[in-house]
Image: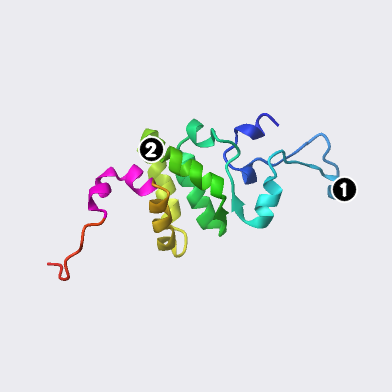
Amino acid sequence: EQDLGRRDFTIDSIAVDLEELTKDYADVRLIDPFDGWADLQNGVIRAVSETAFQSDAARLLRAVRLAAELGFGLDSQTEVLIQRHCHLIANVASERLREELLRLLAVPESQRFLPRLDDLGLVTAIFPELAQAKGVKQPKEHF
């Protein structure tokens, strides 16, 4: 259970005791200290702990990507944690950010999630140059 506490999201913190595993799968008991099974059933991405994003800031983007891929919503407390720790994304290797962004953009209708990234503070945390462009009125004609 200690290992499960180091996972990122509750849906990834479910295990089975292999010693108890028998041919009668009806008797298999889930080890689920963070109610990940309920979150799976309810379609929720929830951080296991407040430190989940501090230990690996790529999880900030991964949360949105998983929600997009699975058609899940983000838990409100997880959203608060993402907003609080979005600045940490600057510490993530560019290769990992690229991979998460490409996977998010590969989701059908991924454009729906870009405003979500912005609401959570991730767009300007990943692309700080865009902060100056916010609120700039676009000209009617583009040349």
Determine the residue located farthest toward the top in the rendered image.
Answer: 2
Determine the residue located farthest toward the bottom in the rendered image.
Answer: 141
Q: Determine which residue is flagged by label 1.
A: 24
Q: Is residue 67 above or below residue 52?
A: below
**Start-end of magenta stretch:** 122-134
Is residue 125 on the magenta stretch? Answer: yes
What residue sits 38% from the left and 35% below the top? Answer: 93
Q: Position of residue 72 (x, y in %)?
A: 57, 57
Front residue of 17 and 127? 127
Amino acid type shown at disc 1: Asp
User: Which label was assigned to residue 87?
Assistant: 2
Is residue 46 on the magenta stretch? Answer: no
At label 2, counting other C-alpha atoms closer than 10 Å, the crowd grade (few under 14, some 14-19, many 20 or more) is some
What residue sits 50% from the left and 31% below the top? Answer: 55
What residue sits 50% from the left and 47% below the top? Answer: 79
Which tag, 2 or 1, sits closer to the chain's start?
1
Q: Position of residue 94 (x, y in %)?
A: 35, 39
Amino acid type shown at disc 2: His
